[in-house]
Amino acid sequence: MIFNPEKYSIPDEPGVPFIDPHEINRYLSRERSDTVRIKEIVEKAIGKNRLNLSDVACLVHADNPEQIDLIKEAANRLKENVYGNRIVLFAPLYVGNYCTNDCQYCGFRISNDKAQRSTLTNTQLIEEVKALEENGQKRLILVFGEHPKYSAQYIADTAKKIYSVKQCNGEIRRVNINAAPLSVEGFRTVADAGIGTYQIFQETYHPETYKTYHPRGRKADYNHRLVALDRAQEAGLDDVGIGALFGLYDWRFEVMSLIRHTNHLEACFNVGPHTISFPRLQDASEVRYNSTYLVNDNDFTRIVAILRLAVPYTGLILTARENAEIRKEVMKYGISQIDGGTKIEMASYAQKKIQDQDLSKEQFRINDNRSLHEVVEELLKENYIPSFCTACYRLGRTGEHFMEFSVPGFIKRFCTPNAMLTLAEYLEDYANPELEHKGWLTIGKNLQRLNGNANVREIRNRLERIKQGERDLYF
Ligand code: SAM
Ligand code: SF4
């Protein structure tokens, strides 16, 4: 009988650190590149079964083109079968870049005296939101440095203010947060403001490496950050996003740890992460890092495909840190959300003039500077439905990604129709005639594919109502 360490290990407890580098390394050292086993594992994943740590350790060891193709093809199949062809769009909004931490890789770190620091004033915040709405955005992620200025109350008030800014047909319908870890009370405060997902990236799960990159400030405490999202769960905020900053340590260790983190959340709270992020380290002002572990494009593609197979129910987020070409490539292997029309310089959405990137004003360099319009255009060309949907969160259908994955017909009943309805709004309100034409063709094609479904007539009816000027219709 094969010994299954996961079955016999001590159960996880909420709030108790769960990463043991020896355990992860044991899994990694026990597995090797093995085509037969990889075939079994990808079949298991395609059957919509969660992979365990031994399975994932085997996939990260895949080292020849045949094995890597097996993994990529399976990820592509799983994505298409489970999620359909929509991609959800959002934009980041940098609210404040004061920071008391000293993360060596980040342009906002306290010891970078070249960084230009600011916090959006009330007027600037409103101007930024209006500019984003004028572009057609409906979903934002707010980004903050870690600083006493950015308390839970401040984050909550900012989110509420953003929800209240409406002009013409523009409105922000979902505000997600990427900010410092909070206390249970703090998470309650932001949850009450109606935020969507709270994201916290562990950066590196490798404790020794973590120590060298986070020498001081609150963030120097690895365990405080590691169990931060347990506190969110305890506060009733069950929509949490995890992530690792790829390039700080061995990517295989980080992928294993992301799965270990997922296992922890599932074991303790019966709900896994809503999203997983896997930013790759980018150039930034005055940064210091060791280039040993930088991840190349091939390995990056493998990371995305392995995560897709390992946790089939979770949203995978890809940002404009990556260039348009690699974004197009890895989207096939399981991405469900991307940002579009991204600007990360403070107060830059409201600036009409196109600015060159100035690293002293930004957290890091971005590599996809396309407008939202251009991103939508490319998605349509690649046969995706660009979606601005926020329905599940607003209807209290939390754990939406889990339902997409586990409830038969969920995608056809809710996700695809909502993607079409929100695309229709975007086309009517923000697109030029050429994009409008292309977009409606896509809607038409996807409607045909839904023929025979119970709600096709109602979808047609709602699309017609949107053409007549109604907004915010969803299932
Ligand atoms: N300050 C908060 C924190 O550290 O959790 C929240 C937001 S931080 C501004 C957002 C994320 O950007 C970090 O968690 C980190 O993963 C990522 N980041 C920082 N520096 C980066 C760089 N040079 N390249 C790519 N991503 C970076
Ligand atoms: Fe501050 Fe976050 Fe940058 Fe670290 S990653 S220096 S905490 S803004």
Image (spheres, grey):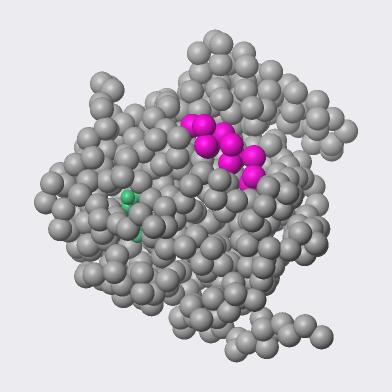
Residue occupying the point 63% across, 67% down: 57
Residue occupying the point 45% across, 35% down: 323
Where 135 sits versus 105, above or below? above
> For this view, does 102 lie left or right of residue 464?
left
> Can you tell which quarter of the image residue 336 is in?
top right
> For this view, does 179 lie left or right of residue 263?
left
Where 367 sits versus 464, above or below? below
Report if residue 326 lies within the magenta region: yes
Q: Can residue 301 be seen by looking at this rendering?
A: yes
Percent position (x, y) of residue 324? Answer: 49, 32
The residue positioned farthest toward the right in the image shown: 452
Q: If the image is split into quadrants, where does the C terminus sit?
A: top right
> Can you tell which quarter of the image residue 224 is in?
bottom left
Percent position (x, y) of residue 299? Answer: 55, 50
Report if residue 176 lies within the magenta region: no
User: Which is more toward the observer, 335 or 405?
Assistant: 335
The residue positioned farthest toward the left in the image shown: 113
The residue positioned farthest toward the front in the image shown: 64
Q: Looking at the magenta stretch, what is its main secondary structure?
A: helix
Q: Can residue 177 be seen by looking at this rendering?
A: no
Where 26 sits versus 315, above or below? below
In magenta, the rendered stretch is 324-334
Residue occupying the point 80% across, 62% down: 36
Residue occupying the point 13% across, 46% down: 114
Where 31 sits versus 104, above or below? below
Percent position (x, y) of residue 435? Answer: 56, 16
Q: If the image is split into quadrants, where does the N terminus sit?
A: bottom right
